[in-house]
Image: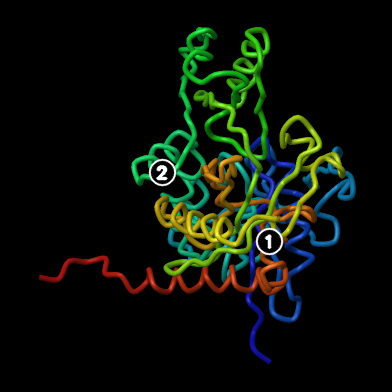
Amino acid sequence: MSKKLRVGILFGGKSAEHEVSLQSAKNVIDALDQDKYEVVLIGIDKQGSWLLNDTSQFLLNSQNPKLIKLNQSGDSVTLVPQGGGVLTHLTTDQADTALDVVFPILHGPYGEDGTVQGLLKLAGVPFVGSGILGSAVGMDKEMMKRLLRDADLPVGPFLVFRAHQANLNFSDVAGKLGLPLFVKPANLGSSVGVSKVANEEDFRHAVANAFQYDRKILVEAFIEGREIECSVLGNDDPIASVPGEVIATHDFYSYEAKYIDENGAALEIPAQVPAETARTVQDLAVKVFTTLGCEGLARVDFFLQPDGEVIVNEVNTMPGFTSISMYPRLWEASGIPYAELIDRLIQLAIERFEREQRLKTSYQG
């Protein structure tokens, strides 16, 4: 029997999406083939500490998304540069733990924005998902939209404001973008800090709320249309899943609709769209993926307008893996079940790492 791969599951994180990551990690761990993988759980608390967790009790209130918490009783660990993926124990004399690959199931800042990806590269260990560049531009919605716009991909109208511009002129913004409009942090996902605005009072509250999560915010025009999502998988030759549709029962696809309210949205998979529209969505999803330098996986979100035009909303380089998340469900509908999807993601991580190891690091004239 071949040696099991030791997979480090990195989850939690210093982010407002911490609880989403906990839910995602639980699902990935449940799906991993225990005959092929040895799981090492590394929970990151909201202060940024890395804790080695026991697989039997790494979460508290795991069945309740409102109360779910990281069990913080684990040993403190860290990765060091050029350590080859070896976890160093900080608070006990336990022997160091070597990892073969890391799955950073982290959402939002300090996890999905290139910070952890840079650390994993320095540590010399393969990891699932995009590298530093793809992660960083995928997380920063301003940079993402500018790059897509420069590549002639369809994005909606938007404005960007920074914290020193907190006293915004509502009439000016509404005159440029129309009403209603959306206000959101530039570097966050899962609809955290996102507000739909129809008047000046709501706008003031929305801006103040968004600035609690980021020093840069986006204000986006409302785009009438169906919410279509498409999953992408691969490195150099990515493929796209069948598209799916999110039919929200809330005013929009909010955090509560995604993760708290079981009836917050209906997911129609595959989306009931013409075959030509489905192909357009898939082609655009792959173009977004490659334009932004993504690797491994991403979910690309679109608006399908009444006239049939498809607009790119955003990309998520580490989409949710909860029981109701679109990314794995779209691949299941496309013929790749959950466990096989996890296998593929791990193999893509190892393939990229091996390819990068063959690059020269010294000049030879």
Considering the image in quadrants, where does the C terminus appear? bottom left
Q: Which one is nearer the viewer's eye here, 217 or 117?
A: 217
Q: Residue furthest bottom?
A: 1
Residue appearing at x 65%, y 11% in the figure = 199
Pointer 1: residues within 10 angstroms few (<14), some, or many (20+)?
many
* Residue 345 % position (x, y): 59, 68
* Lower sequence index among marks 2 and 1: 2
**Within-10-Å neighbours for mark 2: few <14, some 14–19, many 20+:** some
Q: Secondary structure at mark 2?
A: helix
Report the colour scheme: rainbow
On the image, the x and y values in percent for residue 14 come to: 63, 38
Question: What residue type is disc 1 on?
Answer: Leu
Identify which residue, 214 or 297, lies in the foreground: 297
Could you tell whether 42 is left or right of 280 in the image?
Answer: right
Instruction: Assess whether mark 1 and mark 2 are in contact (beta carbons under 8 angstroms).
Output: no
Report the amino acid beneath label 2: Leu
Tell me the distance, in whole angstroms, between the alpha carbons under discs 2 and 1: 24 Å
Measuring 57% from the left and 45% from the top, which residue is drawn there?
Answer: 302
Q: Residue 148: which numbered mark, if any?
A: 2
Q: Residue at x 64, y 54 (%)?
A: 105
The residue at the far front in this view is 307
Q: Report x, y in % for residue 287.
A: 44, 56
Q: What label does residue 330 carry, if any?
A: 1
Residue 224, located in which quarter of the rendered image?
A: top right
**Residue 269, disc:** none
Task: Say what secondary structure mark 1 lies in.
Answer: helix
Q: Residue at x 55, y 63 (%)?
A: 240
**Residue 85 drawn at (x, y percent):** 53, 64
Image quadrant in which you'd find residue 154: top left
Q: Quadrant of the N terminus?
A: bottom right
